[in-house]
Amino acid sequence: MQQVVFENLGKIDYKQAWDHQEEQFEKVMQNKMTGNGDLHYLLFCEHPHVYTLGKSGEGSNLLISDETLKRINATYYRINRGGDITYHGPGQIVVYPIFNLEAFGITLKDYIHKLEEIIIQFLKDYGISATRLNGATGVWLDVGVLGLERKICAIGVRASRFVTMHGLAFNINTNLEYFSYINPCGFIDKGVTSLQKELGKSIGMEEVIAKLNNLFAREFDIVYKK
């Protein structure tokens, strides 16, 4: 069992959260390289409207101009995670695990599988059947049903020497209109949804955070440090 420092950053600017991630990543990496024991962080937050493009993504998947970005009060960053373009905004819970995977004894593929499983199990508690899509990360609904496949949680990570950064973005009460300004994760033939849209009602973020905390603890066999 690994001990993890949990931080709820609340509503925070994307760049500010990214800088904080980098700081915690360096602490975890330093601990690992000096043999000072295992250190892990789990960060939860919400961001103002922002689009982020992964290092292998195509800039053309952002479908709007700088002027339109300003009009819709959104920002745009090219960042160092995997994956293509995605959106973060109010009503979406973003989770950044900064884990030393070697301490957990798992591969990067195992890690991503566990992130997906957490969301799949979360949705099951609300009566929503979700699964994975071959050839794509994240959690999806109605996989294999032409015209109905839609993503509810995006996943994009970076790992250096098996220490992770970035993570998942789970649409809870998200304004889905903002996804119309991009090709989400590079797809042009698949939709995006939220927990609110699927249930027909909004869900409190405190409830979401508590459930996700429990699922992370169970899936990764962790205990939270006081």
Image: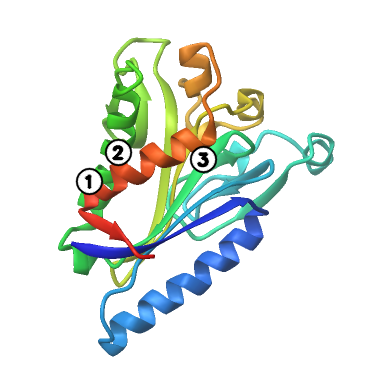
Any part of residue 186 in sight: no
The amino acid at mark 3 is Ile
Residue at 60% x, 24% y is 176
Is residue 28 rendered to the left or right of residue 109?
Answer: right
Q: Residues within 10 Å of mark 3 (few under 14, many from 20)?
A: many
Residue 151 x %, y %: 43, 26
As drawn, the residue found furthest toward the front would be 226
What's the CA distance linking mark 2 and mark 3? 13 Å
Q: Nearer the viewer, residue 139 or 170?
A: 170
Q: Which residue is mark 2?
A: 118
Residue 8 x %, y %: 52, 53
What's the CA distance linking mark 1 and mark 3? 18 Å
Mark 1, secondary structure of its residue: helix
Mark 3, secondary structure of its residue: strand
Q: Nearer the viewer, residue 119 or 143?
A: 119
- Label 3 near label 2: C-beta < 8 Å? no
Residue 29, located in which quarter of the rendered image? bottom left
Q: Is residue 28 above or below residue 76?
A: below
Q: Residues within 10 Å of mark 1 (few under 14, many from 20)?
A: few
Q: Which residue is mark 1?
A: 219
Q: Which residue is mark 3?
A: 93
What's the CA distance linking mark 2 and mark 1? 7 Å
Specify which label sits upstream in the sequence, 1 or 3.
3
Any part of residue 154 in sight: yes
Specify which label sits upstream in the sequence, 2 or 1.
2
Q: Residues within 10 Å of mark 2 (few under 14, many from 20)?
A: many
Q: Is residue 108 above or below residue 184?
A: below
